[in-house]
Image: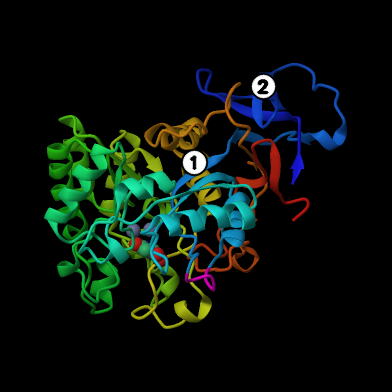
Amino acid sequence: MASIKWVVNGLVWNDAAGELEKKHIRIENGVIAEIVGGEAPAAASDEVLDASGKLVSAGFIDMHVHLRDPGFTHKEDIATGTRSAAAGGFTTIACMPNTRPAIDTPETVRYVLDKARTEGNGVKVLPYAAISKNQLGRELTDFAALKEAGAIGFTDDGVGVQRAAMMKDAMALAESIGMPIIAHCEDDSLVEGLYVSEGKFARDNGIKGIPNESEAIHVGRDVLLAEATGVHYHVCHVSTEQSVRLIRLAKSVGVKVTAEVCPHHLVLSDEDIPGMDSNWKMNPPLRTPRDVEAVLQGLEDGTIDMIVTDHAPHAEEEKARGMQLAPFGIVGFETAFPLLYTTFVRTGKWTLGFLLRRMTEIPASVFGLDSGRLEAGAPADIAVLDLESELAVEPEKFHSKSHNTPFGGWKLHGWPVATVVGGSVVWSNHTA
Ligand code: DOR
Ligand code: ZN
Ligand code: ZN
C-alpha cells in the first residue's frame, strides 16, 4: 500500500460556486493537512498521486453492504469485498450481520473487525450487529456488549423484525446506550414466496407480486415506535411511495428518523425487467415507475438522506436457480457512482455536489463518522474519478467474487481511477 503526500492537479467540487476547481491536497500522517490552489507543488514522484483532469472527492461512504464473512465466503470475503469497495471509490463501508453465524455476539463483531484488519485492504469496515439472536426475531442480543466490541448499530437486515413489541424493546434498549436501530422493513405475512413487485411485470407474467404495503407497514409502525422511544431510527433501502410519505410525515413532526435509497431503486422500475432473469431480483424488489418517481422526489427534498448500495453478492450457481428460487440481491460497489453520475448528473437533473454529499458527508454526519469531508483536518480518505471516459459495465471484470448485476453492458461515465484511505493508495486501476 503506497503512502502518498500529495494528490495534485485534481478537480474539487466547490459547492458555493457550483463548479469544479483545480486543487492540490497535502497529506500528513494520514490526515488532510491543507488544500491549495495555484501551481502544483514539487515533490518526489512516488509520493504524489497525479489526478490531472480527474474529479477528487472525499471517499464514498456506504452504510449498507453485505461482506458474507463468516459463513458465505464463496459469495464474497473481506479481501474481495474491500477491494470491490475501493474499486467503486468507497473508503468506509458498514456491513450487515446476516452472516453464518450471524453477527450477534461480541466474538463475531471482533472476528469481522480482525478480518478487516488482517485481510482487508485498508477500507474502513464498520460492523452492524443483529437485533435478535440469529436474526430469528425471538430474543434480543446483548446490545451493550456488542457496542463495546465495536458494533455501530443494530439491525436484522435480510429480514424484518416481525413483532412490534420486540422492535419497541430493541429501540428502547438502543436509545438507552445511544445507538441507532437500522431496519429492513418487510412484513413477512404479505410477502411469503413472492419475488417481484406488484406491477406490470408481475401482471404480464401472470404471477402474484409483492405489495408496497409489505414495506410501508413496517415503516409506519416503526416511526411510531421511534417517536415513543426517542431512538435514532434509520430505514433501509426505501423503495415505495408510501414509505416516502410516512418518513416525510415523521420527519415533519420531529421523529428522529433517517433513510437510505439504493441506486437500482432510483434507476430501474419493474417495467425494465427484461424477463425471468435473477440478476433483476433483489429485496426490496424493483417497484413501479410511480414509486421510482416518489423515491427520487424523497431524495431530492431531503426525506431520504443518503445513498447506499446494499451490495449483495451471490454465487453464479445460486443465481442460476432461476428467478423464483435464486437468492435476492445484486452487487453494487463497482457501478454505484458511474450509474448515478451518468443518469442524474450528466443529464443535468442533479448537481455533482448533490450526488457527492449523499455519498460522503451526509452518511458521515447521520452516523457520526469523522470522514466524508474533503478539508484540512479530515482523514485522507479520497476517491479519484474519471468523469470523461465512457466505458461499458463488464461484470466479469468486477473485483467482487460475484457478478450478479442487471447493469452489464451499460455504457457509463464516472469511473473510479484511484482510492486512498488514510493517505495510502488502496486501489488504482493503473496497478490493478
Ligand atoms: O436483496 C437483498 N439481498 N436484500 C436483502 O435484504 C438481503 C440481501 C442479501 O443478504 O443478499
Ligand atoms: Zn435489507
Ligand atoms: Zn441488505
Secondary-structure class at tag 2: strand
Q: Quadrant of residue 375?
A: top right
Compared to 267, does 69 lie above or below? below
Q: Which residue is drawn at 67% across and 22% down?
A: 33
* Image quarter in which the C terminus is found: bottom right
Q: Nearer the viewer, mark 2 or mark 1?
A: 2
Residue behind mark 1: 347
Secondary-structure class at tag 1: loop
| Residue 75, label in figure | none
105 left or right of 51?
Answer: left
Q: Which amino acid does label 1 sit on?
A: Thr
Residue behind mark 2: 33
410 left or right of 279?
Answer: right
Residue 318 appears in the figure:
yes
50 left or right of 100?
Answer: right
Q: Position of residue 9 (x, y in %)?
A: 74, 28
Q: What span is colored magenta in the figure?
A: 71-75
Q: Where is residue 57 in the image (x, y as percent from the top left)?
A: 59, 34
Q: Residue at x 22, y 61 (%)?
A: 139
Q: Is residue 416 magenta?
A: no
